[in-house]
Amino acid sequence: MKIGVFICHCGENIGRTVDCARVSKAAGFFPNVVHSVDYKYMCSDPGQNIIKQAIKDLQLDGVVVGSCSPHMHEKTFRKAVADAGVNPFLCEIANLREHVSWVHDDMDVATDKAIDLVRFAVEKVKRNAPLKTIQVPVTKRTLVIGGGISGIQAALDVANAGYEVVLVEKEPSIGGHMSQLSETFPTLDCSQCILTPRMVEVYQHPKIKLLTYSEVEKVEGFIGNFKVTIRKKARKVDDTKCTGCGDCMQKCPIKKKALSEFDENLTTRSAIYVPFPQAVPNIPVIDTEVCTYFKNGKCSMCKKVCGRDAIFFEQEDQMLTEEIGAIIVATGYKLYTIDKKPKNSEIKGYGEYGYGKYKDVIDGLQFERIASASGPTSGEFKRPSDGKEPKKIVFIQCVGSRDESKGFSYCSKICCMYTAKHAMLYKHKVHDGEAYVFYMDIRSGGKMYDEFVRRAIEEDGVKYIRGRVSRIYEENGKYIVKGEDTLAGVPVEIDADMVVLATAMIAQPEASKLAQTIGIPYDKYGYFVEVHPKLRPVESSSGGIFLAGACHSPRDIPDSVAMASAAAAKAMVLFGSDMLEREPTIALVNENLCAGCFYCKKVCAYNAIEVKQIFDRQGNFVKEVAYVNSGLCQGCGTCNATCPSKSIELIGYTDEQIYAEIAALM
Amino acid sequence: MENKNQDPKIVAFVCNWCTYTGADLAGTSRLKYQPNVRMIKLPCTGRIDPVFIIKAFEKGADGVLVSGCHPGDCHYNAGNYHARRRWIMFHKLLDYLGIDESRLHFSWVSASEGKKFVDVVNAFTNKVKAKGPFKKYENINKEFVING
């Protein structure tokens, strides 16, 4: 075998700490290496041409590139190699950037390590087999998880392109947090007015199957061929009969026992309810936790008044399975509740702000409900404790965000803007009111965003104070906010009527569980992780699973919508062809050696191992052996490690290859 | 090849999806760590045959690090559970093989834990450094050569 080694400087990224010339020189002495060079940018066109030319001139049949992580450019180099007529799987990458030059300072040490890594790669590539990619069919249907603005946007985009969509939402209605908002920055247009038409469009779209009050239970399969199990929770209402007249809700004797989730606990709702009047679908749900019928069987008022006989107390959860090709995850966020130390959390909480203790200390979403025309006060500013109009409101930004000691280290991104909006909305309705904002910095990057904040300060007279608040306490019906003005260098005390805390955006509490169900990575906060932060920001590392909206990181509506459209486009890219190419790293059985113990079958997570019967020439049964279904095998190699007779091997990671890598250590 | 400044020698068997990517993240975040670890990338920790670990010691490793996705996070659903079960069985045999159990470290490092990767590598490198070189197999190999 004739191997060529190509060492990339990556500009100065590798070259600064790795002596690339020394690496390529050392590699030239490795057995089978007939050619070894270094170049400034191997991934560039001229760089790739160096590889292609060397393959042609020297008839190379194996290539090792010492460059950035294989997760970055393995595909690029494999393609270049293939263009020059060598099987792409005879190209291996030595990771000299992420694993060497960026993590070590000493040039000698880094160069030695780089030489080692190249040697491993050479030893491995010697034993690589030429492989062909596997073709699998694609199911051209998309599952969208989450029916907030991101999920709605993604579903509509995919459906409008003519592909079927299954939209799953765990709440009784789609709409998400956006449906709770009053007006949106920086245009101050009414949130519901722009959202509800899109919700209806989803409901009426012939290509969208909407499953509300449903959750994803199980995801099997792989890119292009997922089988998804969805739990359709029992509404206790027959959705084929219900017309959404609302008689049941009016007659429900329980009016005060359940707090309204939609109104962020500022009001109550009946036991049978729709979350808000414009809910889609407009079909109620019975909250079995509070409903008298489900407690002691004594009430069935809703059943009596329902003219359509749609109340169905005996209804049970239903399990549906859907064949899916691509999944878009758009599960959104929650606001961090800051009253006390949350259960099972490292977060210490902000007890000094009195949230949960003082009724008039509220969070951002509660303020949205108060400011909303559809909210508990019909958009009039009345404080929750006594219904009086607050004349002085203090807004506190970065509660839980950018606070490593007590909250989260990240910036929640939307709070600077929505706090400016809140203060503005308040000043527009209460002209003689005073609005104070405590901030750390103003982060208003975005089209017309900074102008918006300037408007709040300059035109509406919102008073911005740079500094943190140390304490809030009640005195004579006022809330004394004690803080510091760090620009003036003086302590500040404000006797406010109401305090609004811009609490951190956090991942959904169930996010990590969902991530495990569908098999995508998540970070320590529970946000889902993309493959590449810059170049592949909407793809998860699991093929065919895409991310949209605030489930990925804190983001506002325009960002979420843009990300959702991007995820939709990525799903449609998959649907552009009928067959998908898959990596051929799958297991292969040596039928002569296989003793038919089927330990491999027991450990296979994909049911990819089948039983094959072997017959001799006369048609007499000889033995049963394992057989790998190449469409199902994902190439984890667990069977390989389990097989007692070593008769099943993972191509590309055979024992021989790994032993060779280990031996190359010496 | 003699790499005197890179003793001890540590071999790491890592999975492609979590720990290898976590190490990439350590790189992108420019976190510095000790240069002794040589990583062998596998698709999944489920692919790790305990023989790999013995082989690494035989070939001169002073320590072996095994790292993959956290329980529940496996890209292949359950490969890391198989790895963990094998580890539970295997670590009891280490003593019989003449390998000090503390020369082998098993940890979970996810794709987002660049910092944890650095901490694990540094802590383990220091531990192996303190133990000194692993000579047992080298001596056996020598005897083997001398006695035919």
Image (tube, helix red, strand yellow):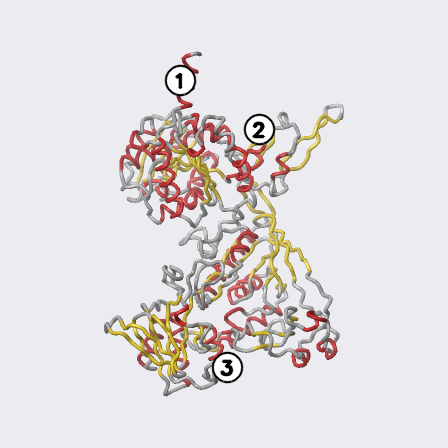
Which picture quadrant has residue A451? bottom left
Marks 2/1: CA–CA distance: 29 Å
Between disc 2 and disc 1, the foreground one is 1
Local secondary structure at mark 3: loop
Q: Quadrant of the C terminus of chain A?
A: top left
Local secondary structure at mark 1: helix
Residue A39: % across, % down: 31, 38
Local secondary structure at mark 2: loop
Residue A500: % across, % down: 41, 75
Which is more N-terminal, label 3 or label 2? 3
Dot 2 surroundings within 10 Å: few (below 14), some, or many (20 or more)? some
Q: Chain of mark 3?
A: A
Q: Is residue A31 left or right of residue A15?
A: right
Q: Chain of mark 2?
A: A
**As displayed, is residue B70 above or below residue A392?**
above
Q: Amino acid at mark 1?
A: Lys
Residue at the disc numbered 1: B142
Identify the residue shown where x is 67% and y is 68%: A235
**As displayed, is residue A356 above or below residue A215?**
below
User: Mark 2 and 3 residues: CB-CB less than 8 Å, in contact?
Assistant: no
Q: Amino acid at mark 3?
A: Ala
Identify the residue shown where x is 57% and y is 71%: A199
**As displayed, is residue A251 above or below residue A170?**
below
Which picture quadrant has residue A208? bottom right
Dot 3 surroundings within 10 Å: few (below 14), some, or many (20 or more)? some
Residue A499: % across, % down: 40, 76
Marks 3/1: CA–CA distance: 85 Å
Residue at the disc numbered 3: A373
Identify the residue shown where x is 44% and y is 76%: A358
